[in-house]
Amino acid sequence: MIKSVVMLAGLVSASVFAQPASAESGGSLQIIVSKDTQSLTIYDGGQVVAKSKVSTGKAGHTTPSGIFSILEKKKYHESNLYSNAPMPWMQRLTWSGIALHEGKVPNYPASHGCVRLPSEFARTLFQMTERGAHVIISDREITPFSINHAALFKPELPAEDGQLLSDAQLRPATIDPALAPTEVALATLPKAGASAKVVLEDIPPLRILITRRGMRETVLDAQALLNDLGFDTGIPDGQIGKQTISAINGFKRWKGLETKGELVTAEFLEKLYASAGKGEPPLGQIMVRQKFKPMFEAPVTIHDPDRALGTHFFEATKVNRFGGKAEWQALTMENHISPTTMKMLGITDQSGVDGPDAAAKALDRITIPDNIRRKINLLISEGASITISDTGLGPETGDGTDFITVTRKAPRA
């Protein structure tokens, strides 16, 4: 995902105040901006590679905190918002206007929301990165750490019979043909005793979000179940239109439920899932993207749903697809949930979401169906990432983005 940073070894600038270390070419880097220290740190497998001072948003123009990806790169760009202000070495993080770019870097927040970088460092960082590279912006200084957990994905090879990866029963999104799953190509054996040559093509890294279900996901599955039971909602799309309303009310009349008031209630969902033989309605959702496009999504189980999961980020490094191994680096970020949002999500306790073992505890509480896990294992490659969050798809996530998770600092007591 990010090119080798050996080029940084010779970088001399007043803005770089950590001694750059040469990085192995196979390492995955993490770019972390800390607003409280006004610094940017590049990590390679947990080791600091380089560090620079930055300038983030001033009062009234606060730089958002969260998990971002580089969406667009331009050597020279002019602001669409602030009088065509020059933005050399621009690396866009949101389509609403937040970016990394060269600019004046005093020892305090001074920008209109972007992350300003010193001139030489901005150019060098631009040369190192590619579209899709993750950038983490945090209110406080955080450090990635190595994590081992049974719930994290491990690469697998396709079955010898050439099983197609799309055979898994999932809810697909519209998939770009260019993203078709890779199969293992076995060369024809020229004679008895010859060995098979296994060729694996590169797989672009997956972007995975595990979160609580929103109304869209709930309605989407309800539509599918209603259709299966003979209540026609049309093509499931997650939207509550006239046909869906009619189908829901028809089901409610069948089960003797109240048709007035709130349409999609917990009682309705429980009856619907029971009638379809599906058990309890799921509370979690896993969504997968690749190259800024949706691939598929599916329900997952969140245990102890009244407790907040917190916000955690994981990135795969040193992926050995033949050996079935991957190492993971993790981060836990502060993300305050307002009382209103807690009530909406059914959360009564958000304690313990930012401790040293919070990421592992969040993984403990998530159960992913086996067919979904295998589907993802077959596609895991260097730089694949997982975000866990309580708050669903944020407003910055859309067409042409990875999953963008904006975090919020707790209000002062």
Image: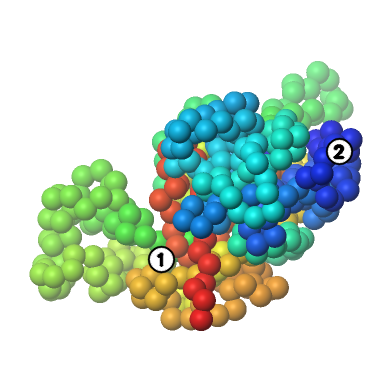
The amino acid on which the numbered mark 2 sits, given as a three-letter code, is Val
Q: In which quarter of the image is the N terminus?
A: top right
Is residue 33 left or right of 64 when viewed as pictured?
right
In front of the other: 238 or 197: 238
Residue lying at the far top in this picture: please name it. 190
The reply to whether the C-beta atoms of the residues labelled 2 and 1 are less than 8 Å apart is no
The amino acid on which the numbered mark 1 sits, given as a three-letter code, is Pro
Disc sitting over residue 12 in the figure: 2
Residue 15 appears in the picture as rendered? yes
In front of the other: 16 or 332: 16
Determine which residue is flagged by label 1: 282
Q: Is mark 2 on a helix, strand or loop?
A: loop
* Residue drawn at 64 percent across, 31 percent down: 89
Using the rendered view, name the quadrant where residue 354 is placed.
Answer: bottom right
Q: Is mark 1 on a helix, strand or loop?
A: loop
* Residue drawn at 55 percent across, 61 percent down: 388
Q: Position of residue 65 (x, y in %)?
A: 55, 56
Label 1: how many residues lie within 10 Å, few (<14), some (14-19) or many (20+)? Answer: some
Label 2: how many residues lie within 10 Å, few (<14), some (14-19) or many (20+)? Answer: few
Whether 210 is drawn above or below 21: the answer is below
Q: Distance between the residues labelled 2 and 1?
A: 54 Å
Residue 319 appears in the picture as rendered? no
Is residue 207 left or right of 395 when viewed as pictured?
right
Using the rendered view, name the quadrant where residue 270 is placed.
Answer: bottom left
Whether 305 is drawn above or below 394: the answer is below
Say which of marks 2 and 1 sits in front.
2
Whichever of callouts 2 and 1 sits on the residue coming sooner in the sequence is 2
* Residue drawn at 86 percent across, 38 percent down: 12
* Residue drawn at 69 percent across, 29 percent down: 201
Q: Position of residue 207 (x, y in %)?
A: 57, 46
Whether 270 is drawn above or below 46: the answer is below
Q: Where is residue 334 in the image (x, y as percent from the top left)?
A: 58, 67
